[in-house]
Image (spheres, grey):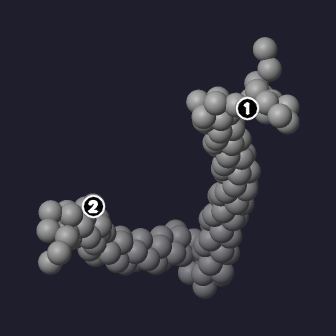
Amino acid sequence: MSSFPPSPAQPGQDQSVGELLSVVTSDLQTLFRQEIELAKAEVRQEATKAGKAAGMYGGAGLAGWMVLLFLSLAAVLGLANVMDGGWASLIVTAVWGVVAAVLYQRGRTRMRTVSPKPEQTVESMKENAEWARHPTK
């Protein structure tokens, strides 16, 4: 059985309104299915691109972490030329501890400003509901 809609009548043959509506409905269903398939293909393509970009961000994060690790090691070795290696390591560790504390505090402050409820959307929906109840106001 073919998935194509029935072919229109030959010229000179009359089709009933019901048959015409059936053909139009079938065509619209086919068009709708094709549009959904196109949307799915586009979403898959965009998701693939986003996944690759996320992988590159992850690689960049790892590379940045390695840079900081080796830069810290270089700082320890540089300080070890003028003082004991243990103290040099302790100084570099303390610097990273201060950086971590500052970043934690800034992140905590910003997180407290985050609202899990979409305030503007809720307000807009309340306005829409009010308008729907009284459209002339």
Quadrant assignment for the N terminus: top right
State whether residue 51 appears in this view.
no
Image position of 22 with respect to 103: above or below: above
Residue found 66% across the figure and 74% down from its top: 71
Badge 2 element: loop
Residue 33 location, quadrant: top right
Q: Which of 53 and 61 is in front in this view?
A: 53
The numbered disc on residue 86 is none
Circle 2: residue type: Pro
Q: Is residue 93 left or right of residue 64?
A: left
The alpha-carbon separation of the residues under discs 1 and 2 comes to 61 Å
State whether residue 76 appears in this view.
yes
What residue occupies the far front of the structure in this picture?
Answer: 12
Q: Which of 137 and 106 is in front in this view?
A: 137
The picture places residue 27, in percent across and down from the top left corner, at 69, 38
The picture places residue 57, in percent across and down from the top left corner, at 66, 62
Which residue is labeled 1 in the image? 14
Which residue is labeled 2 in the image? 116
Q: Which of 65 and 98 is in front in this view?
A: 65
The picture places residue 77, in percent across and down from the top left corner, at 66, 74
**Tag 1–tag 2 contact (CB < 8 Å):** no
What residue occupies the far right of the structure in this picture?
Answer: 11
